[in-house]
Amino acid sequence: MKRMGFVLGIKADQIAEYKRIHAAVWPEVLATIARCNIKNYTIFLKEPENLLFAYFEYHGTDFKADMAKMAADPKTQEWWVICEPMQVPLETRKPGEWWAEMEDVFHTD
């Protein structure tokens, strides 16, 4: 299992809508997340900076392939069409990233 963290901006005027839709994520999207070996997925919001922090645990063996499977899912694509206009990717993200991946520097159980 690998712990993963990602950060992304969100438009201030979209926060309420983002919270509303994430209170009832579509079952098909949740099923795809599970099929892609992701567990314990959480998104946190930090205001007034308007940053989203996503944390999840990856239980697969090929993250790139699982993310390609997720990106190919039609219902997930529909979900992203709704979410992406609300978001502001960091200028410092790596090429090909939307959510900027973070380095895991400490953990304790």
Image (tube, rainbow, N blue to C red):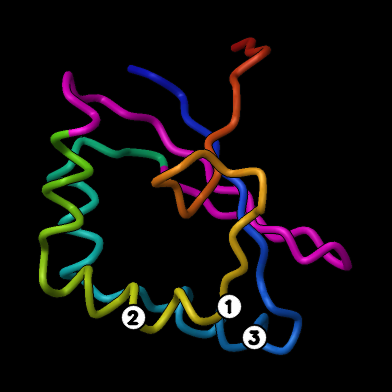
User: 10 Å neighbourhood of mark 2: few (<14), some, or many (≥20)?
Assistant: few
Q: Which residue is mark 1?
A: 19
Q: Quadrant of the N terminus?
A: top left
Q: Which residues are magenta?
A: 41-64
User: Which marked residue is nearer to the observer: mark 2 or mark 3?
Assistant: 2
Q: Which residue is mark 2?
A: 81
- Check residue 54 for magenta coloring: yes
Query: In the image, 97: left or right of 27?
Result: right
- Res 107 → quadrant: top right
Q: Amino acid at mark 2?
A: Val
Q: Amino acid at mark 3?
A: Gln
Query: In terms of secondary structure, where does tag 1 sit?
Result: helix
Q: Amino acid at mark 1?
A: Lys
Q: Which residue is mark 3?
A: 14
- Classify 67 as above or below 45: above
Query: At 59% from the left edge and 19% from the top edge, which residue is drawn?
Result: 104
Query: In terms of secondary structure, where does tag 2 sit?
Result: helix
Distance CA(mark 1)–CA(mark 2): 16 Å
